[in-house]
Amino acid sequence: MIGIKGIADFGNRFFETAEKLGESGKLLKGEKGDIDKELESGKDFPVSLKADFSLLIGEINALEETRRLLKGVVEELQHDFSSLIKSKSFDDFADNFKDLVRVERLKEAPDVLRGIIHMEVGLALSFIAAMKNFETLRMKDYEDSFNQYFFSSNGYKTVSGDLILRPKLPKNIRETGDQINAERYIRDMTRIVVETTGDKLYNMRERYARFAATYQEGFKKKLIDWFDSFGDLAEASLLPVVEGIINGAFNIELNPLVAAAIGTFCSVTTRKATEHSYLTLLGIS
């Protein structure tokens, strides 16, 4: 079966691969002594630290192969999505989803997410890898993150202090405001799922605080800026490739939000693994 199970299996494999590469330091290459070279160079860009995301291309190319495995992949996906969306309650949805991807913990989803997940299968897929690969993660961690996004005026704050703000309606018709659309919400919420997972998996928030305290003075501050720079590079490297292949392999006309959800999942998963590799390279274990 390709369908939703195929996409879920891909997400799971991608998560596992990115985690292993992040742990092994293969996403970012350099030696501890290279940090001193960077600081002495006086340049605003790295000269001895190299990122290599081509190691993930093999997993991405596996998506392309699915197009050759089954002529009816689009029809099967349409059937899967239709069956899930017709679920009368979230518990029914979780049961039907479990039949496809065998994930028991989906029923633990907090109230703030249940209705959204029920209506948007792409968001449900973003939980699967986290649940399968990080069994000790609490659903309350996700609830806290999403409550920040929906109810805090400051939105959800990433480990480095960037804010993910929900789009808002303009106060009057003459104001443009942030554009409110489904893709924006799905990308934001998928990002928050992966950010929350990665922060817990790699103990990122405690480590980032130590990192920022260590490199807060003078020209050392550029190493703090590079934390986000390498993460941005990871996302920029993966997002167009993943979404381009999904569009071809699964037919974007089926559900354009699937490509948005999976593309964001893969790119932010790579970001978190890269952030972990970067802190490890700097000796922040």
Image (spheres, rainbow, N blue to C red):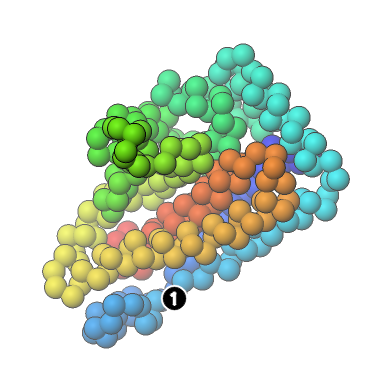
Q: Is residue 277 above or below residue 110?
A: below
Residue 150 occupies quadrant: top left
> Which amino acid lies under the numbered mark 1 shown in the image of this protein?
Lys
User: Does 102 sit left or right of 65 as displayed?
Assistant: left
Residue at 40 percent across and 46 percent down: it is 195
In this image, 162 relative to 121: left or right?
left
Dot 1 lies on which element?
A: strand
Q: Residues within 10 Å of mark 1 (few under 14, many from 20)?
A: few
Residue 76 shown left or right of residue 271 in the figure:
right
Q: Position of residue 116 (x, y in %)?
A: 50, 27
Quadrant, the N terminus = top right
Q: Quadrant of residue 74?
A: top right
Would residue 156 appear left or right of 191 to someone viewing this image?
Answer: left
Q: Is residue 224 above or below residue 108?
A: below
Tell me if residue 213 comes above or below residue 82 in the rendering.
below
Residue 48 visible here: yes
Question: Residue at (24%, 83%) from the top-left corner?
Answer: 42
Residue at the right extreme, as displayed:
71
In this view of the protein, which residue sits in the foreground, 274 or 25? Answer: 274
Q: Residue furthest front?
A: 174
Farthest residue, direction top: 88
Q: Which residue is mark 1?
A: 50
Please state which of residues 175 and 232 is positioned toward the viewer in this rendering.
Answer: 175
Q: Give the residue drawn at x 24%, y 79%.
A: 39
Q: Quadrant of the C terminus?
A: bottom left
Q: Position of residue 101 (x, y in %)?
A: 66, 33
Residue 131, percent from left and from top: 52, 36
Residue displayed at 40% across by 61% down? 231
Residue 109 seen in the current view: no
At which x and y percent is residue 106?
54, 27
